[in-house]
Image (cartoon, grey):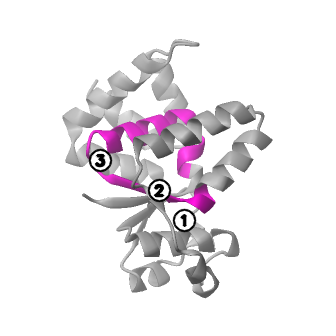
Amino acid sequence: MFPVFLDTNAVYGAALCDLLLTLAERGTYRPLWSTGVLGELSEVLCRNGISPAAVVHRITAMRDAFPDAEVFGYESLIPQMQCDEGDRHVLAAAVRGGAAVIVTFNLQHFPVDLLASYQIGLVHPDEFLLDQLDLYPSLVAQTVLDVPEAYENPPVTVRDFCDLLDRSGVPRFVKAVTRLL
């Protein structure tokens, strides 16, 4: 299955994270992340007002749902990564995990020529979801319909969910998928 390394910012927003991970659960790609990414996610969520218990619950659910997603043993590669200092751990884990692509909003942090030397692509979440839609149109559209059904408190309509995705930074995907709904 196509291995995709998810940067912290791709799994930060709940709606975008839920869509990405549900697509992975349905077999469109294999998600990868690292201890560093999950640690960063935990810090950012707590700093932005999410309760520590909710953060632990979310990260535990991610680990439980995808027990083979977490990349280990990448730390020794960090110093040799020639990208943005704050994202060296991401590239090191993507290399160690055998990722085909890194999904991130921080495209400018990863020199394309450097990634090419590791045979790793770089893609914005909007573009990644558009690719998923091209490859699996019915499945992706159905997933956009299904994910909001799990939201209970408060309940979320499909339109609300698409608005959340749009605000999360994937407006072209939202426009494309709503034509199919």
**Kind of residue at disc 2:** His
Instruction: Answer with left or right where residue 86 lies relative to residue 108.
Output: right
Q: Which residue is mark 1?
A: 107
Instruction: Answer with left or right where residue 25 lies relative to residue 138.
Output: right
Q: CA distance from mark 3 to mark 2?
A: 12 Å
Q: Of helix, strand and loop, which one carries label 1?
A: helix
Out of 124 and 171, give the one closest to the viewer. Answer: 124
Q: CA distance from mark 2 to mark 1?
A: 7 Å
CA neighbours of label 2 inside 10 A, class few (<14), some (14 to 19), many (20+)? some
- At 37% from the left edge and 71% from the top edge, which residue is drawn? 98
Q: Of helix, strand and loop, which one carries label 2?
A: loop
Residue 144 drawn above or below residue 168: above
Q: Which residues are magenta?
A: 10-37
Q: Which mark is residue 163?
A: none
- Specify the quadrant of the image occupied by residue 121: bottom left
Q: Which mark is residue 124?
A: 2
Q: Which quadrant of the figure contains the N terminus?
A: bottom left
Q: Position of residue 123 (x, y in %)?
A: 43, 61
Instruction: Answer with left or right where residue 148 lies relative to residue 177.
Output: right
**Kind of residue at disc 3:** Gln
Any part of residue 50 in sight: no
CA neighbours of label 3 inside 10 A, class few (<14), some (14 to 19), many (20+)? some
Mark nearer the N terminus (2 vs 1): 1
- At 42% from the left edge and 55% from the top edge, which residue is drawn? 69
Out of 77 and 137, give the one closest to the viewer. Answer: 77
Residues marked 2 and 1 touching at CB (< 8 Å): yes
Q: Which residue is mark 3?
A: 132
Q: Position of residue 19 (x, y in %)?
A: 42, 36
